[in-house]
Image (cartoon, coloured by chain):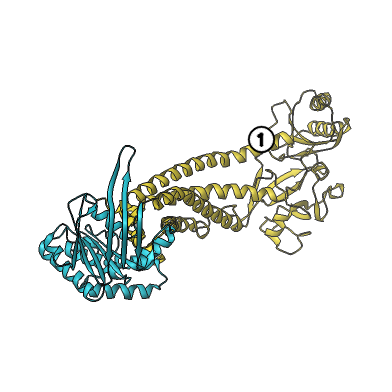
Chain colours: A yellow, B cyan
C-alpha cells in the first residue's frame, strides 16, 4: 500500500506542490522559533554564577566633565574610596565594590586573543563578596596583590575549559596574551554570565582594580544589602553618597529591576516570533484543511471506486492520512535539507548541537501534529463517500 | 449465486419518496450471463448496486453466494465486495494519476498480498484483456475501448465470483463495444457469472437471459 501511495503522491506532485511548499516554509519558521525558545530555555538551566538578589547598582557622575576620561585625579580616587566606605556603613548594607560593568547592563567590554573571545570586567577586591561568586579553584584578588608586577586575573570556568581544557589554569597566562600585558590567572570562579540567565555561556575575565590615580575610571558601584531593607533604602543610599561627594550625582537601580528589563529584552524576540509563527501555522493549518477538503471533494469518484472494490471506511481514512503524511514528509525533507546546512556552514552561533537537535525534533513533531490535526476532518469526510452515489456522478 | 426475494428500495428526500425498486424477485445462477434492460430511471443501476452490496434493500432478502446479506458491518460488506464481486462501469472510473497496472492492482490492495504478488496478478489480468503492452501507460493515453478493458482487468484481477457491469459499452462505439462483450462472454465461458445492465438490445441478445424492468418493477 505504501508503494501505491508513493506512486500516487509522485504522480500528483504538481497538485501537491502547494502543500509541500506551505509545509516547507512553516517548518522553517517553526524551527527558528523552536531553536530560539530552546536556546533560551537551555541557557536558563545553566548556573548564573552570582546572586543578584538584594544587590543595587549605582551609576555615578563626577560632575566635572571628566566622567568619560580614563584617568582620575587623586582627589577623585579618594572620594570614590570614601563613597565605598560610607556606603558600606549605611544600615542594611553588607558590602560594596566598584566595577566597570554591572550585571544585566547589556554592555561591557570584550577582547579576543587567539580566536578566544572573552568578556572583561574590572572590579575591586570586594566584588566576590558583593556578588557572592563561587570560587572553584585558586583564590580571589586581595591586598596581597598590591604592587605586583604581574596583574592578577580571575577567569570563569567557561574560559578555563576553552583555554586550558582539563589542565589547571591557576598560575598560567591566557593563551595569546601580548607579552607586555602581564596578567596571571590566580583563580577560577563558576561560569559567570553577566547578561543574565537567558544569555549564552561566555568566557569571562575579572581584572583587579586598585583605587589609585593611575587607575582607569570605575563609574559604577554594586552594593549588597540585607534581605529586609526599608522601602526608602535607595533614597537613603543616595543621600549618604551625596553627603560624601556633594558634587557628584548618583543613580541607584536594583539588579532585580535590571534583570527584569534584561529578560524582557531577550524574551521579546521569542514572543514576537512566536506570535508570527503561530499566526503562520494557523494560516497553514486552515490552508491545509481547505486543500484537503477540496482534494476529497475532487476525488469523490476515486474514493467511491475504492469503496466499491473493497476498501472499508477505516482504510479510506488511513489512506487520506497516509497521503498527507507523505506530502508532509516531503515538505519536511526539503526543510531539513536547508536546516542541516546551518551546522555545516557553522551558522549555529551560540546554539549548541543539543539545542539544534531538539529544535529539529520539536519542529518535526509540531508539523506532523498540525497536519494530522488538519487531516482529521477531511479524512472523516472521505469515509462518508457512498460508493453508489459517487460512481453515479460524471 | 445471487438471490433476491421481494426486494424493494426507495430513496427519500425531504419532500418526496421515490420507489426505485418494488418487490423484485430474481435468481442468478452460477455461470449465468444475465442482462438487465429497461428505460432510464427504471431501477437498473439500483438493482445492480444492491447485487454488488453497494447499497442495502429497504425490504426483502438478498443473498450472495449463499450468504444472506443483512446488517453486516461496513468492514464485512467491504470484504465481501472485495472477494466476490467485480465491477465494470460505463465511465470506466479509472484513477487518472495511476498507471494501467496500478489501476488494476487497486482491489488487491485490500487483501493480504505482497507487492510482487499484486504485480503478477495485475499483469496476468492485463494479459487476459490483451493490454500487456500498455502496462505503464496512464489511462489518458489509451482509447476508450482500451480503458474499458483496463476496467475489466481490474474487475477480474481478484478472481471474483460475479461480474457486475453497468452499461459497459455505453461510452464506446459499436466495434469497441463488441470487443468488450466478446471479453465478457469469454469470462463467462470460463465459468464467471456476469450480470450486465444495458440499453442496447443487440448487446442483451448475447446474454443467456434478459430481465426487464419498468418503473422499478420486474416485467419479464
Q: Is residue B47 left or right of residue A33?
A: left
Q: Is residue A198 left or right of residue B48?
A: right
**Residue drawn at the location 68% of the way across and 33% of the way down:** A68
Q: Is residue B197 left or right of residue A289?
A: left
A99 to A361, vertically: above or below: above
In the figure, residue B193 lies in which quadrant? bottom left
Residue nearest the observer in this picture, A393 or A155: A393
A167 to B21, vertically: above or below: below
Q: Is residue A46 left or right of residue A391?
A: right
**Residue drawn at the location 69% of the way across and 43% of the way down:** A196
User: Is residue A6 something that shows in the picture?
Assistant: no
Density class for disc 1 (Cα within 10 Å; few <14, some 14-19, many ≥20) is: some
- Across and down, in percent, residue A73 comes to 77, 33
Residue nearest the observer in this picture, A33 or A314: A314
- Across and down, in percent, residue B183 comes to 19, 71
Residue nearest the observer in this picture, B216 or A269: B216
Q: Chain of mark 1?
A: A
Rendered-image quadrant of the N terminus of chain A: bottom left
User: Is residue B110 something that shows in the picture?
Assistant: yes
Total marks placed:
1
**Residue drawn at the location 34% of the way across and 48% of the way down:** A297
Query: SS for tag 1?
Result: helix
Please name the residue that numbered disc 1 is placed on. Answer: A261
- Across and down, in percent, residue A363 comes to 53, 52
A153 to B111, vertically: above or below: above
- Across and down, in percent, residue B158 comes to 33, 70
Amino acid at each position: 500500500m505504501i508503494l501505491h501511495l508513493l506512486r500516487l503522491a509522485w504522480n500528483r506532485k504538481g497538485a501537491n506542490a502547494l502543500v509541500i511548499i506551505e509545509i516547507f516554509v512553516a517548518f522553517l519558521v517553526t524551527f527558528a522559533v523552536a531553536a530560539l525558545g530552546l536556546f533560551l530555555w537551555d541557557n536558563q538551566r545553566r548556573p548564573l554564577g552570582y546572586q543578584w538578589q538584594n544587590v543595587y547598582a549605582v551609576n555615578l557622575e563626577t560632575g566635572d566633565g571628566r566622567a568619560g576620561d580614563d584617568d582620575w585625579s587623586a582627589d577623585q580616587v579618594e572620594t570614590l574610596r570614601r563613597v565605598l566606605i560610607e556606603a558600606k556603613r549605611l544600615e542594611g548594607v553588607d558590602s560594596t565594590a566598584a566595577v566597570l560593568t554591572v550585571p544585566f547592563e547589556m554592555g561591557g567590554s570584550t577582547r579576543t586573543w587567539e580566536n578566544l573571545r572573552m568578556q572583561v570586567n574590572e572590579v575591586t577586591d570586594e566584588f566576590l563578596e558583593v556578588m557572592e561568586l563561587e570560587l572553584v579553584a585558586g583564590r580571589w584578588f586581595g591586598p596581597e596583590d598590591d604592587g605586583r608586577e604581574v596583574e592578577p586575573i580571575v577567569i570563569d570556568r567557561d574560559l578555563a575549559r576553552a583555554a586550558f581544557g582539563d589542565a589547571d589554569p591557576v598560575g598560567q597566562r591566557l593563551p595569546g596574551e601580548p607579552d607586555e600585558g602581564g596578567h596571571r590567572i590566580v583563580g577560577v570562579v563558576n561560569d559567570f554570565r553577566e547578561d543574565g540567565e537567558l544569555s549564552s555561556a561566555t568566557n569571562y575575565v575579572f581584572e583587579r582594580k586598585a583605587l589609585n590615580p593611575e587607575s582607569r575610571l570605575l563609574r559604577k558601584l554594586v552594593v549588597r544589602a540585607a534581605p529586609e531593607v526599608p522601602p526608602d533604602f535607595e533614597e537613603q543610599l543616595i543621600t549618604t553618597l551625596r553627603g560624601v561627594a556633594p558634587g557628584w550625582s548618583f543613580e541607584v537601580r536594583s539588579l532585580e529591576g535590571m534583570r527584569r528589563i534584561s529578560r524582557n529584552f531577550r524574551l521579546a524576540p521569542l514572543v514576537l516570533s512566536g506570535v508570527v509563527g503561530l499566526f503562520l501555522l494557523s494560516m497553514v493549518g486552515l490552508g491545509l484543511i481547505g486543500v484537503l477538503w477540496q482534494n476529497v471533494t475532487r476525488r469523490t469518484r476515486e474514493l467511491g471506486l475504492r469503496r466499491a472494490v473493497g476498501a472499508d471506511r477505516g482504510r479510506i481514512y488511513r489512506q487520506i492520512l497516509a497521503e498527507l503524511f507523505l506530502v508532509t514528509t516531503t515538505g519536511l525533507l526539503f526543510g531539513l535539507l536547508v536546516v542541516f546546512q546551518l551546522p555545516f556552514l557553522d551558522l549555529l552561533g551560540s546554539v549548541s548541537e543539543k539545542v539544534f537537535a531538539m529544535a529539529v525534533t520539536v519542529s518535526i513533531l509540531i508539523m506532523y501534529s498540525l497536519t494530522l490535526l488538519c487531516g482529521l476532518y477531511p479524512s472523516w469526510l472521505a469515509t462518508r463517500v457512498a460508493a453508489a452515489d459517487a460512481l453515479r456522478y460524471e | 449465486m445471487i438471490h433476491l426475494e421481494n426486494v424493494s428500495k426507495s430513496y427519500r428526500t425531504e419532500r418526496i419518496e421515490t420507489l426505485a425498486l418494488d418487490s423484485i424477485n430474481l435468481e442468478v445462477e452460477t455461470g449465468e450471463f444475465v442482462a438487465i434492460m429497461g428505460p432510464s430511471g427504471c431501477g437498473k443501476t439500483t438493482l445492480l448496486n444492491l447485487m454488488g452490496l453497494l447499497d442495502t434493500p429497504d425490504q426483502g432478502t438478498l443473498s450472495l453466494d449463499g450468504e444472506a446479506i443483512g446488517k453486516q458491518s461496513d468492514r464485512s460488506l467491504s470484504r465481501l465486495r472485495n472477494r466476490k464481486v467485480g465491477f465494470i462501469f460505463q465511465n470506466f472510473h479509472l484513477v487518472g494519476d495511476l498507471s494501467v497496472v496500478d489501476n488494476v492492482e487497486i482491489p488487491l490492495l485490500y487483501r493480504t498480498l505482497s507487492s510482487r504478488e499484486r504485480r503478477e496478478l495485475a499483469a496476468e489480468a492485463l494479459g487476459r484483456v490483451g493490454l500487456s503492452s500498455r502496462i505503464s501507460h496512464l489511462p489518458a493515453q489509451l482509447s476508450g475501448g482500451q480503458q474499458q478493458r483496463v476496467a475489466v482487468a481490474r474487475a477480474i484481477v481478484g478472481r471474483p465470483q460475479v461480474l457486475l457491469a453497468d452499461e459497459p459499452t455505453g461510452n464506446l462505439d459499436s466495434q469497441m463495444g463488441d470487443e468488450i462483450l466478446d471479453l465478457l462472454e469469454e469470462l463467462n465461458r470460463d465459468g464467471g457469472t456476469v450480470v450486465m445492465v444495458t440499453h442496447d438490445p443487440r448487446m442483451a441478445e448475447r446474454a443467456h437471459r434478459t430481465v426487464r424492468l419498468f418503473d422499478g418493477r420486474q416485467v419479464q
